[in-house]
Amino acid sequence: MPETPAKETRASEVTRLTNAVTSDVSTGDLRGSTQPAGQVPLIFETGETGRANRYFPNGRSLEEFLPAHVLRGALPLPDNSELEVVRHFTKLSQRTFSIDTGFYPLGSCTMKYNPKVNDAMANLPGFRDLHPFAPDELAQGALAVMYDLQSYLAELFGMAQFSLNPAAGAHAELAALLIAKAHFAKRGTSKERTTVIVPDTAHGTNPASAAMVGYKVVSLKSDARGRVGVEDLRAVLGPDTAVCMMTNPNTLGLFEDRIHEIAAAVHEAGGLMYYDGANANALMGNARPGDMGFDLMHLNLHKTFSIPHGGGGAGHGPVGVAEHLVEFLPTPVVTRRTGGEQPAYALDFERPASIGPMRSFWSNFAHAVRALTYILANGGEGLGEISRLAVLNANYLRVKLRDVLEIPYDEVCRHEFVASAQPLKRATGVRALDIAKALLDRGFHAPTIYFPLLVPECLMIEPTETESKETLDAFAATLRAIVEAARTDPESVTEAPVRTLVGRLDETRAARQPNLRWS
Amino acid sequence: MYTPHTQSDIEQMLETVGVPTLEALLRVPDAVALKRRLDLPEALPETLLVERLNAYALQNKALGHTSFLGAGAYRHYCPPVVGSLAMRGEFLTAYTPYQAEVSQGYLQAIYEWQTYVCLLTGLDIANASVYDGATALAEGAIMAVNATGRRAILVSKAVHPNYRAVLRTYAHGMELEVEELPLAADGTTDVAKLDAKLADKRFAAVALQSPNFFGAIDVPGAAARAALASSGTIPIAVVAEAMSLGALAPPAAWGAQIAVGEAQSFGVAVAYGGPYVGFIAAGTEHMRRIPGRLVGRTVDGEGRPAYTLTLQAREQHIRREKATSNICTNQAHCALIATIYLAALGASGLRRCATLNVERAHALAERVARVPGFTRAFSAPSFNEVAIEVPHGMTAGGVLAALQEKRILGGVDLGRWYPEFGRCMLTAATELTTDAEIEQLGRALEAIVAERKEAVRA
Amino acid sequence: MPQPEGLLYSKEHEWAKFDGDVATVGITDYAQNSLGDIVYVELPRVGSAVAQFASIGVVESVKAVSDLFSPVGGEVVEDNATLEADPAAVNRDPYGAGWLYKVKVSDLAQRGLLMSAADYDAMVAATGT
């Protein structure tokens, strides 16, 4: 808790508000845990030289083996006792918001519960300690994991084949666009096919990935229904069209209901349809990109398939393709040969049309284990039900918030929806950013804000299927209380957060005088 | 399904929404509707689920073998304290720390990681991480292209073949040229003609790996460094075995402006190839071109020190098609593991571990050289890997297959990437390699030689 | 605030001040104000050729980035090196210390494609913010 008297007053106001919130909720405190106060010194500011090395035997010195000129002088790292290390990182963990500590309604990020059994399975010695250069015949279990996972994904999303090679969603986008480039090169049209069409609701990675393959990006404005207009699309299609990148449902949470017409138009122009799978939790097991006419796609297994985000990775971003693009998939491809006593799996590097490898080794394998575990735990039926409940939760919250915030596209949404604080800002000066910060004070993580760009003062909310009705009710009540506070005492919202470890940061200073390391 | 909904919850919620069934919420046009039941497995209860996954894991028979595999992925000792801390749910289930006020802990850990990378490489700044060593090289090369406006990259043939292949994948997309520097006889990069090669100032960067793919310490001498400086070519250091940073002179010491590499050795499991953790460090002059996330230290409104993601205007979510890279999700959790590993080992632990690697590899090389016909392929000093030439009349592939029959994974066949080295195998030792394992390898090779003599005689 | 006289303006919110055939270029007060705290300015290299109205650099604020479109074409002869250490000058003094770069203009007829202060003010007023 801040120590200055001025802040104490403000903090007590917040407590009053929070009490008002919790009294609305009969089922108890569903907010995230508050974090302990106080700074944690950097690991470089603690410890004493000579306090470490408890792990290895003593022995001969480096100079006995290597000439002095190749050796380093000082190794200026801190020596901490193991207990100091444990306390340091335990304190850092307590100062980190996570799914395990509270509700995390971050739109387009699918912050669902990450089952602990997934981690336990990834940590089985047979997986954890397997070297990537182990001969195929001694790595049959790992290859079977990869093969089964890529096969299940292909069936779930209607693609001919998936490759688990790319490390994350953006990496898979890059792979897919390289595949598109190879496809057009084979047809001799890569010089003409120079344009990638990206709707204005697209994730920022789409245009950034396109630029890495030298494609020119054409941004397409959404129509009044928050969707891609087929006529608008036709106006930009032409002999230069290489790929149309779509997210469906889009980042407004709306299903592109003319997707078959869109796909037909793009195909007619000779282009390819790319499906950004960031929002796949909205349709898994209920509808398939392959049936909608998509030729290429990626998945973020760390969203839809419950792999923990780990504070920003590692993710896992398989790339999937229709039959006519299989030959271009990155290497290696996992193959399966039947006919013997048991099927034999192998890594196939000999693929002359392939775009080549995307990374050092074959896949983010430990995450493939997690995703496969999740699929087997839920089964095909369960995966479909997961999407249906994710959509139910989003719609329930949308309806609960109707009279709290503006819902610019107030129709049945999919796994997420957007609200706008624009009317509130006009009336009170309180912005989406302020609401986000006020949520932090009340133990919830903020939604994604200011995205997608076309909705002013946007809050993008994705509750996911693993949250209970009680949590959704508590969140709606809290948002309602914040909006009421904005009307009666706007300062109490614009000054938030005051109950967190630190208040709003001086980001201008951070960017003007960057301090990126201890020294 | 890990979903909390009771039937009554579902009914109440549907009523609130005003839709009769769950299916109605997900209705799509007939043209794109699912036409059949999907062919997917039935759900397994957790007891059977664990049994099923165990069955897969048990098919990985490599684990019963003595292993000398390295070549970019290394088996090192990871103290249990590392996993115990890193697997805390707060770390594991956090998203990218966009809301700094409730993410100070993770942000501080990444700031500490950036500092560790700087201290180990000797360079000024480092990013939060990239996917792995190979993509770090590709991203580092793109930084050099953007810094110089030149569109060609020169890379040593002694750089990990997988890294070079990935560089080519990226370069093909961006229409960059990639050329290779040849090898010298001692197993290092041949930089004798570097000045002539760089004279036309066509190359944005020269990438050199040390220890290189053959295990040899491979840093350019004074003449090569002068050629790099006078041509304005950016030297990129590639570090595929981060453990070497605990013992060898850091990349900055030979003039590298950008260091890229793989930090899997710092506590991250080999896990059949991933996830690992790539790093990029550079001089301050490259700060605006470094890809991916950066954590900075600043203050809050009260003047309290605090950490935040910074220089975000470089990144894809703001700059879109003009971003320095498309990277979004990186390898934060692997970087966290590496940070905890380095904190646990400290300077004295890391130096000791690195020293043991050198000592074990020497013991391995000496033992193998006592086997008739087996020699070290190259004379340059090495870190924890040695390239071994097998006797005339044999191939590395043949020897490795024979070792495998004796439950030994002896290394990788260099002929896989270098046809001229079909009689060479790359063999690694780490602090975990025991005298008994080395002796087991020595005897197995002796047996293979003896068996072959028998066969020739017969 | 009304725009200084004697400068010419582009519809992308840049200004140019001509001194013979050399024009000094900057962004307008309106532009700096809508961007917020500017943290970095990426300028064209001295010696490079720029075309009128072509994208030649960016201005970064904390969470936004905006393209710079050169109001004049020609050869870049000087850039404002002080902005590297003090990008805030663009916020403080957009028409003075916050200038960006100078161009030796290839064709003075380019001036005809730029606006007067009064026309620029009218354009900004018409955008309604």
Image (spheres, helix red, strand yellow):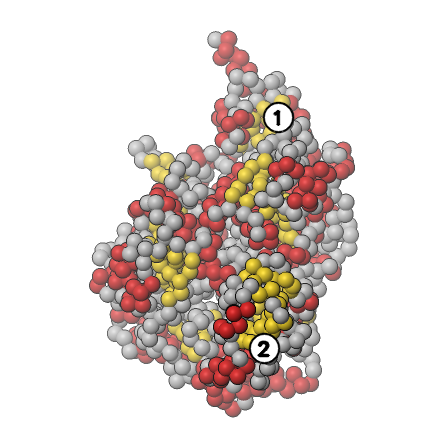
Q: Which residue is mark 1?
A: B377
Name the one closer to the observer, A485 or A97: A485
- Quarter of the view holding residue B309: bottom right
Q: Are marks 1 and 2 on the same chain?
A: no
- Quarter of the view holding residue C43: bottom right
Q: Is residue A127 left or right of residue C96?
A: left
- Residue A321, given in percent of the width and then of the height, sits at 34, 50
Secondary element at image label 2: loop
Q: Is residue A236 visible?
A: yes
Name the one closer to the observer, B146 or B30: B146
Determine whether A378 is above or below B73 in the image: below
Q: Is residue A435 visible?
A: no
Q: Residue reaching furthest top? A: B457
**Chain identity of mark 2:** C
Q: Residue at x 54, y 47 (%)?
A: B151
What is the three-letter code of the residue carrying label 2? Leu
* Quadrant containing the N terminus of chain B in the rendered view: bottom left
Determine whether B45 is above or below B391 in the image: below
Q: Is residue B41 left or right of residue B329?
A: left
- Residue C125, given in percent of the width and then of the height, sits at 49, 84
Q: Which residue is mark 2?
A: C7
- Quarter of the view holding residue B194: top right
Name the one closer to the observer, A116 or B168: B168
